[in-house]
Image (cartoon, rainbow, N blue to C red):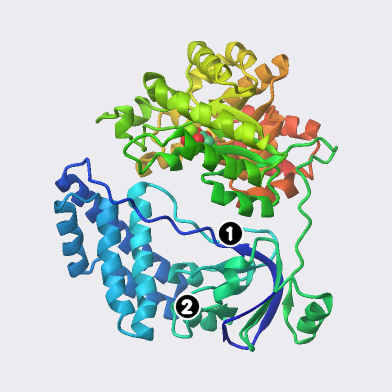
Amino acid sequence: MQITGVGVGHGIAVGPALRMPDPIGEPPDVDSQAEASDEYRRVETTLHAVTDELVALGHQAGGDAEEILEAQSLMAQDPAVVDDISRRIGDGKTAERAVFEAYEQYAKVLDALGEVPAARGADVRDVARRVIAKLRGVALPTVPQSDAPYVLVANDLAPADTATLDLRQVIAVVTRDGSTSSHTAILARNKNLVAVVGATGCDAIINGQTVIVDAEHGEVVVDPERSAVSAAAERGGTVSTPRPLTPGRLADGTAIPLLANVGSPEEAAPAVALGAEGVGLFRTEFLYLDARTAPSVELQRSRYRDLMAAFSGRKVVVRVLDAGADKQLAFLGHTHEENPALGRRGLRALREHEDVLRDQLTALAEAQNDTGADLWVMAPMVADVDETAYFIGVARSLGLSTVGITVEVPSAAVLADQIVPLCDFVSIGTNDLTQYTLAADRQLGSVAHYQDPWHPAVLRLIKLIGDAARVSNTPVGVCGESASDPLMAVTLVGLGADDLSMSPGALADVRATLAGVTLEQARELATLALVQHSAADARAAVANALA
Ligand code: PEP
Ligand code: MG
């Protein structure tokens, strides 16, 4: 397949394609349930945070990028837009929707003024997306990480993404939108990066396909003949061939499946392209977050089917709705709580609204029947035997066969010898296990330094779970972010983890590190970490021993 666009510069590059994840979606146009003054205060704080972030990114990037990012930071403070947001909130819109509409209006005015202002419209929309992501408390989709150089394919790139690209990883860029005057093109030119922008057909490129990006001719060749790759190399092009994506394995051959944490079915294909052997944590909150009522069984079933189809024949671990804490939902009766992380979160809220839980489990069981998937289902925020038995009972009664829990509340870890044998599997959520063990809110910057899973107290709780799993022969995985740290991944295996689930971008590094140690060595490293007196010492002990 050949796609044409506008080339930037004269270079040529060949490599595997990796797509930028889709941008965050448009906020729904629903009536706000919050006080307008509270909504406006949230926006005001967020606009300041986005302004600071863009200025800081600009300083870091320097040159033209600094100027562009500073201009964007001003868009986050534009008085006309800020007034417009305030008016829309006053009319009953949610903060997210008001931000979306006000910036979209501004961008449309720029779009109508011709090519150069229209290119700035893209920057305005990027500011809106940044603000909305922060308001929702979710991370913006970022440039994928890979251990092998690749060609980045995107609808468009925000100036901040282009300015901060790691050129050891990204050898070329192909975008669907954009023109010679777009900021993607300007910054690509500055960075001497091979790029083709306005490549309308690039939506068809899928992760892992080899592409030749020929900037001189404004051409992108997908799945080229070998002779075309050789010709590109002869023209002095950068040629990167993908590294094989082998399954996770220790040096002694012990299999440690490496799975992906995903938050929507759309994240499945990029995860497979990076070698995910299945899904270790599918966060289902995306179906509920912007909803005023719980989604129907039919809607859920079709979304679960999409995910299961992408991982056909491979394990898919789905976590039922984890609302509460930072994700409050009116239809679960959430009202103000002084300490929401310690409140009606996860299974606690679902148990009080069993209809919502039953609908979700029914949709999962039906999607499994439709696809024949290897489905494992678990509950979040489980504290004791009673809650474990409750969840397993409801899930089994609705036809699910592999049922377990996330161990993320310290009480569940302490009671692992009682809880683990009841489950078909358990998965350790080290993010929450760390926050609750160290009694430090994971959302609060001022106590962020406590949020370190290397803390020996956390490691000891993980060991309790690993030991209980070994005694009862129950599979145990880790789905917290700690599994993305290669040194921690080895330590977790030593503490008893049978598989590890992480952001797909981390798979390659973890795969490479695990391949260098045996199970016996991993256990020795874990023993070493357990006796340290601080998180820093535990990490250093493992790092030194492996050096
Ligand atoms: C965890 O707590 O470690 C976890 C994986 O879940 P979340 O980050 O969604 O709370
Ligand atoms: Mg959690």
In the rendered image, which quarter is residue 351 located in?
top left
Quickly name the residue at label 1.
144
Residue 73 screen position, x and y as percent: 31, 68
- Picture mark count: 2
Quickly name the residue at label 2.
178
Residue 502 screen position, x and y as percent: 60, 43
SS for tag 1?
A: loop
The residue sitting at 24% across, 54% down in the picture is 43
- Outermost residue toward the right in this view: 252
Residue 278 seen in the current view:
yes
The disc, 2 or 1, on the residue closer to the chain's N-terminal end is 1
> Given the image, on which type of amino acid does mark 1 rest?
Pro
Residue 29 shown left or right of residue 5 in the figure: left
In the depicted view, which residue is nearer to us: 455 or 374? 374
Residue 475 screen position, x and y as percent: 69, 25
Residue 47 seen in the current view:
no
Are the two marked residues, 2 and 1, in contact with CB atoms closer than 8 angstroms?
no
The residue sitting at 44% across, 32% down in the picture is 322
